[in-house]
Image (cartoon, coloured by chain):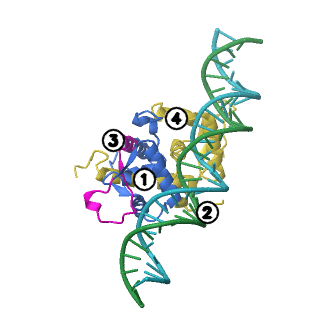
Chain colours: A yellow, B blue, C cyan, D green
Amino acid sequence: MTEGTNPLSFLPLTPLAFLVLLALADEDKHGYGIIKEVEERSGGQVTLRTGTLYTLLQRLVDESLVEESLPSAASRGEDSRRRYYRLTALGDEVLRAEARRLEALIGDARRKHVLSDTTGA
Amino acid sequence: MTEGTNPLSFLPLTPLAFLVLLALADEDKHGYGIIKEVEERSGGQVTLRTGTLYTLLQRLVDESLVEESLPSAASRGEDSRRRYYRLTALGDEVLRAEARRLEALIGDARRKHVLSDTTGA
DNA sequence: TTGACATATTCCGTCCAACGGTATACCGTT
DNA sequence: AACGGTATACCGTTGGACGGAATATGTCAA
């Protein structure tokens, strides 16, 4: 790995990379499934084209944030063309680190009254 | 403006664009000041080079998210080389929209146990 | 008043992620 | 076998970010 294994060295993630890692956080998914999840989750606002997703996915594999996984028992019998991906331990750490970074920025935004303040402070 | 005035059409912002708009949220700043704020706010983690910042700033001006502002009364007497920038009404809307988008994603991350859950749910 | 250093902006070449679309192929249904 | 939906791969182009050099002004001290 050319970037070392320090999660912080991967930040900030591109918006799309964050979306993809987040989509893989709860369960392994195949490429097309990721496209669907991202589009639905954004309320159809973000349209993730195939050219974008598959090259991004390959990049994430190259960076060891994601790895291909053999179809699980649960997915056996499904479309054989599907290639499943899952987060690596490093990918999971990077996702958490980015989520914390964004959480801190949201806090800043609140302090600057960019967002309504839920705490009443 | 080539992109219309719908704030949602600007999303997602690049991580750097979000950082810069957020830096301008509370008060007008000059380029170098933005660089310092972003670096300090990230704990020295993000190093914003001049080439990156000034070209980004110009792009934001072209997109009508930011505009140059004459030095305010408060800043008069300061370094005359400084060029001050402020959010436009559109820029403010875009910043808010992006903050809300990120807030929603942070919620997803919590639901997926990527982040610790502050609500106890 | 000149020298040194920090501040501040501009400009340039390179790199790479994202974009948009096409090609290919397999799936299920009719 | 033909069709629409699913699924991945490939490719040329664009544009934001990168890294640094160039330029110039401000400040302060000797």
**Residue to which mark 1 is pinned:** B19
User: Between marks 1 and 4, how big is the CA–CA gap?
Assistant: 27 Å
Q: Earlier in the sequence, mark 4 or mark 2?
A: 2
Q: Chain of mark 2?
A: A
Q: Secondary structure at mark 2?
A: loop
Residue contact between numbered discs 1 and 2, judged by CB atoms under 8 Å: no
Q: Secondary structure at mark 1?
A: helix
Q: Quadrant of residue A85?
A: top right
Q: List x then y, in percent, for residue B65.
A: 40, 44
User: Between marks 3 and 4, how big is the CA–CA gap?
Assistant: 32 Å
The magenta span reads B70-98
Q: Amino acid at mark 1?
A: Leu
User: Between marks 1 and 2, how big is the CA–CA gap?
Assistant: 25 Å
Q: List x then y, in percent, for residue A99.
A: 45, 51
- Residue B60 among magenta residues: no
Disc marking residue A37:
4
Residue B42 in sight from this viewpoint:
no
Same-chain status of marks 2 and 3: no
Q: Chain of mark 1?
A: B
In this rendering, the answer to whether A26 lies above or below A5 is above
At a point 36% along the width and 63% down the height, the residue shown is B80
Depth order, front residue of B50/C25: B50
User: Between marks 2 and 3, how big is the CA–CA gap?
Assistant: 42 Å
Q: Earlier in the sequence, mark 1 or mark 3?
A: 1
Disc marking residue A4:
2
Q: Amino acid at mark 3?
A: Ala
Q: Amino acid at mark 2?
A: Gly
Residue A9 in sight from this viewpoint:
yes
Disc marking residue B89:
3
**How dense is the environment of label 3, judged by Cα within 10 Å: few (below 14), some, or many (20 and up)?**
few
**How dense is the environment of label 4, judged by Cα within 10 Å: few (below 14), some, or many (20 and up)?**
some
